[in-house]
Amino acid sequence: MEKALRVARAVTVVYFVLNGTLLGMWVVQIPAVEERVGISHATLGGFLVLLGAGAFAGMQVGGRLSDRLGTRTVVPLAGVLCSATLVLPGLAREPWLLGAALLLFGFGNGTLDVSMNAHAVQVEKAYGRPVMSAFHATFSVGGVLAALAGAAFTRIGWTPAAILGVAAAVGVVVALAAARGLLPAATTAATTTATTASPADALSSAPSDAPAPAERRPDRPERSKRPVPGRIWLLAVLALLVMLCEGAANDWSVLHLKTVLDAPESTAALAYGTYATTMTVGRLLADRISGRFGPVAVLRNGAALAAVGITVAALSPWIWAALAGWALFGLGLSGCIPQLFSAAGHADPAAAGTNVSRVAGLGYVGMLAGPAIIGWLTHVMALNHAFLLLSLFCVTAVVAAGVLRPVPQPPLVAELTP
């Protein structure tokens, strides 16, 4: 059944790319939507709170449904929901309609995000080696594709509704087509209780999507023996800070070049594209770097590089230098979230989905707060000066990176190789 495991890894990549593309398509359309609806940066920042709030709610629902129904059921449904709601911000012409549209799109995005990450932890356990950063790299690939496509369609005169509508339709098809390759829910129980089984044995022992019988499930009897709630919440706080920085880059990088440096819309779109490209490269390398130097080094050095990058972007009067700053920012942040999610998922194998949802959920509070804080700060300072707050958050992550040092626990899963 090694083929089934390889297929599961491939379709997990598909869902990460899908999520990155859907979110990126919205990001590229932010300036056009803001102008059409007729709102200020500060008002947009307030509406982006609704996007983050919807994502947070979706992650809580998605995490619980993933534990209850299995990721094989939840991931494709979440993909359809996220895709279908993408078109709504493009159709909104009144501020209140835009707020409602962002709330719904955020819910779909959060549900897809947490369920696909829970499935990624499941795949990583079956492989027995780090693969989480590579999955997150493919999310960034989706962002790059969205930036390029969005810039091209904007240049030829497509409206936001048309661009987002086409992306939504393609997303629904992809979400449904990839569903058959996901791992069955029972694999989680099999891999957490095995001591000598191979990935193929674990897969072949899972007869259906139904949860394992109560007497075989380790979560309720074992969870109390292996909880690390203090460490999980520390990981969650770091996720909040890092994803706050990511959220600010997602929602304000394009507007930064357009409004502060007077770049054309097609050039301004490259700010997010540059950031997403370097984040992709960094995540493709992060698994190997983490394996050699450890997750603490990845987080500490990455956050330090991100602090330098965002400072350059904020203070530079030149478009080329600002793009270089966004590139460094993306490269520095690239390996941080995958390390945090992976640490949460492996901290307690019997509660992996719950712990990932905690860390990802609080991280999405950061996604909520980041764009909003930057928007509110534009009341009292220039947009680029508000970015200096992100430098402070990156430095905080540098100082607190030691939380990623592994905590010794009794072995629960054998060393597995495909």
Image (spheres, helix red, strand yellow):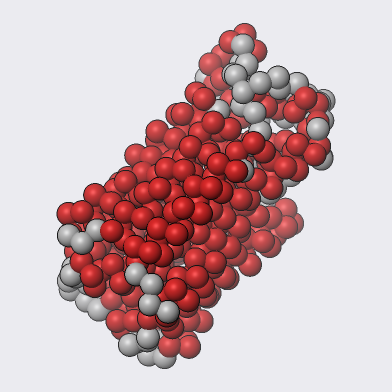
User: Residue at the location (60% across, 43% down)?
Assistant: 177
Whether residue 381 is situated above or below residue 369 in the rendered picture: below
Q: Nearer the viewer, residue 152 or 318?
A: 152
Q: Quadrant of the C terminus?
A: top right
Residue 322: image location, x then y, percent: 44, 83
Residue at the top extreme, as displayed: 215
Q: Nearer the viewer, residue 369 or 157?
A: 157
* Residue 385 in sight here: no
Residue 406: image location, x then y, percent: 63, 42
User: Residue at the location (18% across, 70% down)?
Assistant: 38
Whether residue 230 is situated above or below residue 270 in the rendered picture: above
Residue at the bottom extreme, as displayed: 318
Q: Picture quarter containing residue 396? A: bottom left
Q: Nearer the viewer, residue 166 or 364?
A: 166
Q: Quadrant of the N terminus?
A: top right
User: Residue at the location (40% across, 48% down)?
Assistant: 84
Q: Picture quarter containing residue 110? A: top left
